[in-house]
Image (cartoon, helix red, strand yellow):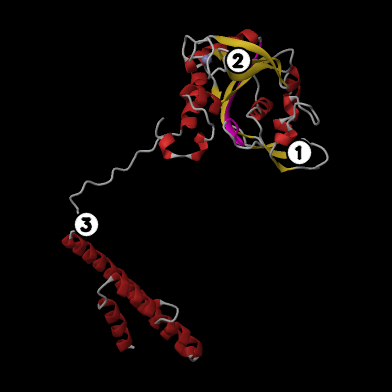
Amino acid sequence: MAALVDDALEAVASCGTLAELEEARVKLLGKKGLVTGIFKGLAVLPREEKPAVGQIGNLLRGLVEERLQDRARELSELEETSLIDEGALDVSLPGRRSRLGHRHLLASVADEITSIFVSLGYEIVSGPEVEFDYYNFEALNQPAHHPARSLHDTLYVRRENLERESPEDVLLRTHTSPVQVRVMESRKPPLYIVSPGKAYRKDEMDATHSAMFHQVEGFAVGRDINMGHLKGTLEVFVRKLFGTDRKVRFRPHFFPFTEPSAEVDISCYVCDGAGCGLCKGSGWLEILGSGMIDPNVFGYVGYDPEEYTGFAFGVGIERVAMLKYGIDDIRVFFENDARFLRQF
Ligand SMILES: [Zn+2]
């Protein structure tokens, strides 16, 4: 047995290169290796001899592994030194500088938007991306078969019955508005909430569509909150975001969960309202959707619409980033091409 150990250790010590060392490792520890052979031989030994032989095998394996590691370290140091001697490795060359990473543009735009509202006293809350139909549609005043439901635009995770929509259906939320319902059903006004996050639609990816996109939802609920508060709040917001000389316009619109509803435009910052390619000649850029929360929504969360009123709005983060930084293709946000990311 002693000769066997000596041979094994000698085999390791005599290796002159890392390649030879690998060969020796296979010969000793590989499937058909010497040490492995000891363990295989256990099967045919009388039972009383097995423990002792097994123990020797374990000791030998530990010793061989240790020597292999030591020799590998010696050899790689030697190989490095000889590379330097041959001039193949010039240690006087300057190192490669590694680049510092930074936040993704969409993350910093989302931060910029939410921090404006935080400075106005709003609180940040988040909600689940995988959502029940109830929170995404039903409690936002879009019961089953409501025409504003975008059934074929919705990515479902589980449907109770393919023939009809159910509040129990599970889906990827199509907007960040379910957070309104979740917060309101668990808390009492006054509420001033912003909620940044992802939303999903069954959209083919092109220059202006993406199946996953980001929104910031915001809403305020309390006593005597009116359309004037909504206008004032959003005017402060868009001027902080796009500059104090921007004009703001509220345009009547329809959303199922707000009444009345308005889309908000800012005067185009490229042509200042004269009309150009960016604003398609109109002089205005659409920034967000908003409105007074529909009393029906309060019904779902147990608020008395005689006592409370509120407003809500939703801002597309990609939309803001594209307008603010002159980006004309939404796909660049998700391709993660470092040449694009580095610009911001
Ligand atoms: Zn313009």
Q: Nearer the viewer, mark 2 or mark 1?
A: 2
Q: Amino acid at mark 3?
A: Leu
1 or 3: tag closer to the N-terminus: 3
Assess whether residue 212 is covered by the magenta stretch. Answer: yes
Disc 2 target residue: 264
Residue 168, label in figure:
1
User: What is the x, y in percent for residue 58?
Assistant: 40, 78
Assess whether residue 109 is covered by the magenta stretch. Answer: no
Residue drawn at x 72%, y 18% as measured from the top left? 294
Q: Nearer the viewer, mark 3 or mark 2?
A: 3
Work out whether 142 lies above or below 220. Answer: below
Secondary element type, mark 1: loop
Work out whether 210 lies above or below 46. Answer: above
Question: Quick check: 115 left or right of 205?
Answer: left
What secondary structure is the magenta-colored segment mainly? Answer: strand
User: What is the x, y in percent for residue 200?
Assistant: 63, 35
**Front-lying residue, 316 or 191:** 316
Work out whether 268 lies above or below 210. Answer: above
